[in-house]
């Protein structure tokens, strides 16, 4: 795909990596729609894009990727706003960390990881990706889109990161589904791809004290966190390379967890 012909929906586009993908795609000439949870955050990214005078259109929507009816609507609304849609970046994600069970040091009581926190992460990070991929694929087939691309943001935690049982499960599943959706959807001209970032400079990490950040960087072979633009380069590669489908690109400075 030529990025300049891109009409792409980014989920979770109001912060961090998603925001960077929105602004970079528009900078490179694609028309971009994005969704996120809060109206103010969505409006702020639209204003930022307008202030920068980017060549691509940027249109934001409020939608929760864990809610079926909202994903159904936002795919239709994004296509209407951009005059078509040929890509989706399933980026929205949350963390709710904790061990499967832990023992209270004082009482000896076994504390179980709450089902609600397990479910919240699966709802956003996995069901959200499923709904985005499904609605985009249905739209692309119904509208005879010639070259469609589904990109999903996994994580280095896909290999299993202690304290992230919910998050690791979702991020591993994304990679499995990216491969099988490639096989299911190739006949319709739709490609898939995933990116598994390592620690990346987004608001969560920006707020860390320098000593905590140094600890995060120590085991990384390249001794630093990744930049959102470095993740965008992988997104761009998947969009532009028409022989790429079904695979995941690890962009993690060479770090291996577990
Ligand atoms: N930052 C990292 O180090 C890192 C590393 C690996 C993977 N990731 C993944 O990259 C993606 C982006 O992460 P980030 O660090 O930019 O996080 P972030 O918190 O800065 O941005 C995530 C965005 O998603 C939105 N969001 C959350 N739940 C949503 C929902 N239900 N519906 C719609 N939007 C929702 C949030 O409001 C936020 O704007 C996530 O999938 C994350 O798991 C991040």
Image (cartoon, helix red, strand yellow):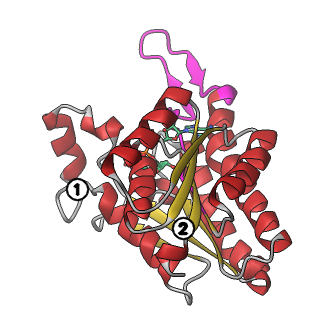
User: In the picture provided, is 175 more to the left or to the right than 204?
Assistant: right
Residue closer to the observer: 54 or 220 = 54
Residue 212 against residue 137 in the figure, above or below: above
What is the magenta segment's predominant secondary structure? loop
Residue that appears at 64% across and 42% down: 124
Tell me the tag on residue 76: none
Residue 249: x %, y % from top left: 45, 72
**Which region is colored magenta?**
88-116
How far from the left and from the top, in percent, is residue 78? 67, 53
Between the residue at mark 2 and the residue at mark 1, the CA separation in whole angstroms equals 24 Å
Name the residue tied to disc 2: 194
Residue 250 in the image: state x and y as whole percent. Answer: 41, 69
Residue drawn at (41%, 50%) of the image: 17
Q: Tell me if mark 2 has few (under 14), some (14-19) or many (20+) residues whose alpha carbon lies within 10 angstroms of its own.
A: many
Please state which of residues 177 and 30 is positioned toward the viewer in this rendering.
30
**Residue 145 higher or lower than 78, as above or below:** below
Which residue ends up furthest to the top in the rendered image? 107
Q: Which mark is residue 219?
A: 1
The residue drawn where x is 61% and y is 47% is: 125
């Amino acid at each position: 795909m030529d990025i300049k012909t891109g009409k792409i929906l980014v989920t979770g586009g109001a912060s961090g990596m998603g925001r960077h993908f929105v602004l970079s795609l528009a900078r490179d000439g694609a028309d971009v729609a994005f969704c996120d949870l809060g109206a103010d955050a969505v409006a702020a990214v639209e204003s930022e894009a307008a202030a920068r005078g980017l060549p691509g259109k940027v249109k934001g929507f409020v939608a929760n990727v864990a809610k079926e009816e909202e994903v159904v609507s936002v795919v239709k609304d994004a296509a209407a706003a951009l005059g078509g849609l040929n890509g989706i970046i399933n980026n929205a994600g949350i963390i709710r960390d904790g061990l499967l069970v832990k023992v209270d040091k004082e009482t000896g009581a076994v504390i179980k990881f709450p089902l609600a926190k397990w479910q919240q992460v699966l709802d956003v990070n996995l069901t959200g990706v499923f709904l985005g991929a499904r609605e985009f694929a249905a739209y692309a087939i119904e509208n005879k889109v010639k070259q469609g691309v589904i990109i999903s943001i996994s994580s280095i935690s896909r290999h299993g990161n202690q304290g992230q049982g919910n998050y690791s499960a979702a991020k591993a599943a994304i990679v499995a589904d990216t491969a099988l959706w490639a096989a299911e959807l190739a006949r319709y001209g739709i490609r898939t791809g995933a990116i598994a970032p390592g620690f990346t400079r987004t608001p969560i990490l920006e707020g860390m004290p320098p000593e905590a950040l140094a600890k995060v960087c120590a085991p990384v072979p390249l001794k630093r966190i990744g930049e959102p633009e470095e993740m965008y380069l992988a997104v761009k590669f998947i969009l532009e390379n028409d022989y790429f489908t079904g695979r995941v690109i690890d962009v993690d400075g060479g770090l291996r967890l577990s």
